[in-house]
Amino acid sequence: MERQIYKRILKDRLFKGIIILLSFLTTLPLFLILFHLIKNGISSLNLEFLFNLPKPVGEKGGGIANAILGTFILILISSFLSIPIGISVGIYLSENKDKKLSRIASLVVDILQGIPSIVLGIIAYLWIVKPMGHFSAFSGGIALAIMMLPVIIKSTEETLKLVPESLKEAGLSLGAPYYKIVLFVILPSGLSGIITGVLLGVSRIAGETAPLLFTAFGNPYMNLNIFKPIESLPHLIYNYAKSPFSEWHQKAWSASFILILIVFTLNILSKLVVKRWKVRF
Amino acid sequence: MESEILRIENLNAYYFENHVLKDINLKIPKNKVTAIMGPSGCGKTTLIRCINRLHELSPGARVSGKIFLQEENIFDMEPMMVRKKIGMVFQKPNPFPTMSIYNNVLSGYHLNGIKLSKYEEERIVEETLKKVGLWNEVKDSLHKRGTFLSGGQQQRLCIARAIALYPEILLMDEPTSALDPISAAKIEELILNLKENYTVVIVTHNLQQASRISDYTAFLLLGELIEFDKTEKIFTVPSDPRTENYLLGKFG
């Protein structure tokens, strides 16, 4: 009898140990990546690197200011396009669960999420770049917006589904029109989830290279015109990393470090938003 | 019978194939508390949700018959208009979680786009919170969120939100069933005070509660209105044996 219990306790401990070990192992790659990036990237990281334009190979110094700014411009364009559409679709899906259109839309969103990003880049090339006749930040923004859309739609839908029906009923029983209940009762109650979705959507596209290859194209100079080609961090890393110059490899590491930093910040920000603005029902 | 404010004529309600309410005829007297009681699933909640047309939210719901609010059939009115005149308090307290106590009380005005002066707003907030006995407890935290209140306080806030619009009828769907006995007692006391200015229709399956606070009682069983009379009479000399059996605890 007693031996059996000891056996059980032993199994219990073993089980717990395995779980802890595996959880620890999953965190390992992230730390290794960070270690590697810091080790290789930190040496050429300085203010000049952040605020200067790239210099030709062979010349010392130079930075990636155009790529950092370009990434932010691309994020702005795609957010501007995908946030209003994404939130609207999310509201529709959560409010009309059983309609035929919402079932179709939901399926489409799921499929959209699975489309490889390179395909989106080619599509944006066909739709925007070809008719316009040249590469542009705008076309890159559209490709990224399509990538971001499902993330925002899904998170909006899921958050709004958690808003209790009783709040909607309370609003209706006051004689309020439906649109005001959505805007002033339901949306604010789900705001933290929606903002989190947007931030995660942004961090998803911030590191995308493939959709930008045939759209934003890249640009070694500073450009603020969204109808002209623009540089971005992931594209610059791609370019520098495949070049034969070791000083460019060095810069690719530093740029990667900055890109990771941006994504990391967005993720932490989204955690803070959930913590602070979470609505208790 | 005193002057009536609401008259229900041949009301039938269905959820898909389910016949939930069968030929209900009922006259709700003005400035009185009318209790609707009956065992679970008898259609009490459906009945009061029909009165402010909230049943329309449920898929598959349909009704036939008429409900007259002062000679006007509510099924011919705009639902928004009906609901502005007939307020509702729900089973579980549901203050708007993102709004302050102050804005919760005024939410009926804000959500309907009615502009009020600052003075007017403050008057309504103070007056209604005093009516529901919440003023002294919250007057220093009016601009905090309503969800930090206790369950009983939240329910009184919800009553305040409903009566701030001065509705002609206040519907209450088991408003004390989610509360502790002390908070429930406070709400009951409040309901008795409310009938000076409002007509209250309350759903309850707590018999003692019905006998304590209502002037009239309707007894529903399996979607049929078995009996409707003065509460006193229903609880002492019910005319239908089924009512008597229910009151004696033989079923329900």
Image (tube, grey):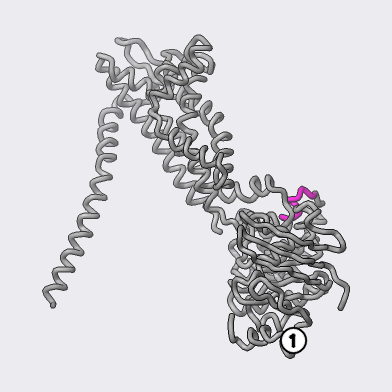
- Name the residue tied to disc 1: B239
Q: Nearer the viewer, residue B59 or B140?
A: B59
Q: Please name the residue shown 60% across and 71% down the image.
A: B41
| Quadrant containing the C terminus of chain A in the rendered view | bottom right
Q: Where does residue B229 sit, x and y in percent of width and height?
A: 78, 81
Give the main secondary structure of the magenta stretch: helix
Instruction: Magenta stretch: give its range.
Output: B107-114
Q: Please name the residue shown 50% across and 9% down the image.
A: A133
| Quadrant containing the N terminus of chain A in the rendered view | bottom left
Q: Nearer the viewer, residue A251 or B170?
A: B170
Q: How many marks?
A: 1
Which residue of the protein is positioned furthest toward the front in this rendering? B17
Tell me the subunit letter for badge 1: B
Q: Is residue A93 above or below residue A204?
A: below
Q: Nearer the viewer, residue A106 or A255?
A: A106
Does the magenta run of residues contain B111?
yes
Q: Nearer the viewer, residue B50 or B22?
A: B22
Question: Can residue B243 be seen at all in this image of the molecule?
Answer: yes
Q: Where does residue B59 sit, x and y in percent of width and height?
A: 61, 54
Q: Is residue A271 left or right of residue B125?
A: left
Which residue of the protein is positioned furthest toward the bottom in this rendering? B236
Q: Is residue B114 left or right of residue A6?
A: right
Which of the 4 image quadrants contains residue B42? bottom right
